[in-house]
Amino acid sequence: MNTFSSYEIHKNIRTSAEAKREKENRPHDVFYFHKVDDPYSHLTINYIDKIKSTFDVALKPVLVGEENAEAVHEPTLYNIYCLEDAKRIAPFYDLELSAEYYPSKELIDQSNSILTAVEEENFSEVAKKVSSALWTGDQESLDTLSSHYVSTPTEVVKKLEEGNKIRNEKGYYFGSAFYYEKELYWGVDRLHHLEDRLIDLGLKTDNTNDSICSPNLKAPSKLSSEKKVNLCYYPSLNSPYTYACSKRVREIRDDYPINLITKPVLPMLMRNMTIPDFKGKYIISDAAREARKHGYPMGSIYSPIGKPARKAYSLFPIIDEAEKGFEYIHELLKASFYDGINIGEDDYLESLVSQLGLDWPTISKDLNTNGWRKVLDDNLKDMYAGNCWGVPSFKITDSDGSNPFYVWGQDRMWLLKEEINKRLG
């Protein structure tokens, strides 16, 4: 984890990758992995031409098929959530996606057949038409395109296998992602990282300062209201993404009229889930990149998985009753992902409890007891109710607990503000 989160190693990898590219006299190739029935690919395909027109790069579209099954946890929840999430964020990017269901297999097969036959230079233009027709169930438009672009089933299978092989070799597992020289950029949420890197390389071809991909936001930096909403926050102690957003959760609490309710859950690895090495590598490097972007860099990491996490969780209920639950989790995350501290050490926990202004002899009576297990299990059930299985997840409700709005991921902190502003602004 320390290797893949290190900023120095990250910079060295970039430098050596560029040196190797120059030595081999290769152009600045940006690969794009497109999956026709991936709702996020429906969004990213609209930015291909902007990348090509804004930067001096060679964009290489790669048609891919099914996700790497090892990397997909809770596939039913995953599919439901992804479509809903993509539909929610599309309007903020001036894009349309209103499908209630995923496309039929027949339309997906037809779409893949069309794009298998398309030349690379025409891929983005045709893929946008295909995506629009696919997600609106426009059979007629797909039939028209099929009359110009024809592939056999064997050719389609071969194309998707080749695409998946390229994607897997680059260390990724989903569609809607970009790759440039040892680094991956998923969806519209990470295009700004790719843009920054290409700018640093001097590849921008115009003098504007406008970003090629950023949501159009209305929520103010601070919001005042006589009313409040509830914001439930589902963190885990072994999640680098939870660490990356912890500071921003605190800022929302300070700047918006909310009742912050902290509901920790067990880490995925303690829920009998497995994370393959290639996904773990991407997660920690991406989370570190996001944390740096938001001014909360990672430092020395000491994973609390197992006994340290259980000990720390055992004190959460009583600390939360003392209204210090968020501060407690926030400090534990900082200890694990910045200070390199083993949070399972009694001396550390005593010091933290005292730092929070609480009485250690009183709090420590719950150390290593089991009451926390039901609390975390109930939190997990509540999180799953919103089709969210990973952390950090969030739920906004009205003050009486009604009208729930669930989102998953530190990528959606801005969407939380938009929803709160819509309800209270």
Image (cartoon, grey):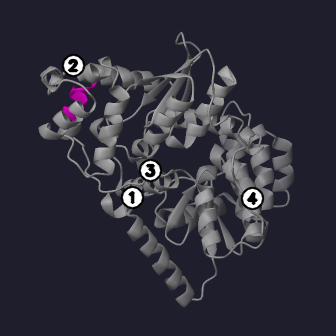
Would you identify the image quadrant in which residue 278 lies? bottom left
Q: Are marks 1 and 2 in contact (CB under 8 Å)?
A: no
* Residue 153 screen position, x and y as percent: 66, 57
**Inter-mark Cα distance, 1 to 2:** 34 Å
Q: Which mark is residue 281?
A: 1
Q: At label 3, which amino acid type do we have?
A: Tyr
Q: At label 2, which amino acid type do we have?
A: Gly
Residue 183 on the magenta span = no
* Residue 34 screen position, x and y as percent: 64, 56
Q: Earlier in the sequence, mark 1 or mark 2?
A: 1
Residue 313 on the magenta span = yes
The residue located at (25%, 34%) in the rendering is 355
**Inter-mark Cα distance, 3 to 4:** 25 Å
| Residue bearing the label numbered 3 | 296
> Is residue 363 shown above or below 107?
above
Q: Earlier in the sequence, mark 1 or mark 4?
A: 4
| Residue bearing the label numbered 4 | 210
Q: At label 4, which amino acid type do we have?
A: Asp
| Structural crowding at the residue carrying mark 2, measured as other residues with C-alpha within 10 Å and reported as few (<14), some (14–19) or many (≥20) | some
Q: Which mark is residue 346?
A: none
Q: Earlier in the sequence, mark 2 or mark 4?
A: 4
* Residue 371 screen position, x and y as percent: 21, 19
Closer mark to the observer between disc 1 and disc 4: 4
Would you identify the image quadrant in which residue 381 lies? top left
**Inter-mark Cα distance, 2 to 3:** 32 Å
| Residue bearing the label numbered 2 | 371
